[in-house]
Amino acid sequence: MSRRRWIGIIAALAIPIGFLCVVLIDSVMYQFGGCRVVRQKLFASPSGSQLVVVVWKSCGATVPDSTQASIVPRGRTFSPESTPTFVSVRGHPDVVVAWSSERAVRIGFIPEADQVYKRDQRAGDVAISYE
């Protein structure tokens, strides 16, 4: 076979092999860096107009698992990308939520969270207390 033909064959094989390598590397990197969010519980306010949404977030081997909570108006779809969290703790403790009124909520963790990443006192117009 001529040299030109060998170069053509190699070039023709390099493109699909290169594409497969990029897809494989992307898949492996996603496993290490991608996060999975699993909704656990919903706690409705007294009138039912708002919800505390509790989720578990797992981001692979490099980031510890966490439990997070957000407040979402009823009828609005929860999205981990666009719904801000007001609390985030390490691990997956049980979450206890008690609404005092439409504008006040208490939240606690069983067992008590050993590491707190985020702990806001307000989420919009709702006051948050921790136990």
Image (cartoon, rainbow, N blue to C red):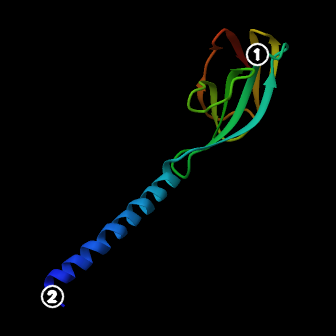
Q: In front: mark 2 or mark 1?
A: 2
Q: CA distance from mark 2 to mark 1?
A: 78 Å
Residue picked out by circle 2: 2
**Helix, strand or loop under label 1:** strand
Residue situated in front as seen by the camera: 94 or 28: 28
Instruction: Inspect the image, locate mark 2, and give the three-letter code of the amino acid beneath it.
Output: Ser
Residue situated in front as seen by the camera: 92 or 25: 25
Label 1: few (<14), some (14–19) or many (≥20) C-alpha neighbours in 10 Å: some
**Numbered label attached to residue 105:** 1
Instruction: Inspect the image, locate mark 1, and give the three-letter code of the amino acid beneath it.
Output: Val
**Helix, strand or loop under label 2:** loop
> Which quarter of the rendered picture does the C terminus lie within?
top right
In the orientation shown, which residue stands out farthest toward the right?
Answer: 46
Q: Which residue is pictured at 70% across the width and 15% down the height?
A: 128
* 35 in relation to 46, above or below: below
Q: Are marks 2 and 1 in contact (CB under 8 Å)?
A: no
Pinpoint residue 58: horizontal percent, then vertical percent: 61, 45
In the orientation shown, which residue stands out farthest toward the left?
Answer: 3
**Numbered label attached to residue 63:** none
Task: Say which quarter of the image contains residue 110.
Answer: top right
Task: Say which quarter of the image contains residue 45.
Answer: top right
Pinpoint residue 3: horizontal percent, then vertical percent: 14, 84
* 130 in relation to 116, above or below: above
Label 2: few (<14), some (14–19) or many (≥20) C-alpha neighbours in 10 Å: few
Task: Say which quarter of the image contains residue 69.
Answer: top right
Q: Which residue is pictured at 69% across the width and 36% down the height?
A: 55
> Which quarter of the rendered picture does the N terminus lie within?
bottom left
Q: Which residue is pictured at 64% across the width and 26% down the height?
A: 87
Pinpoint residue 81: horizontal percent, then vertical percent: 56, 32
Pinpoint residue 50: horizontal percent, then vertical percent: 75, 18
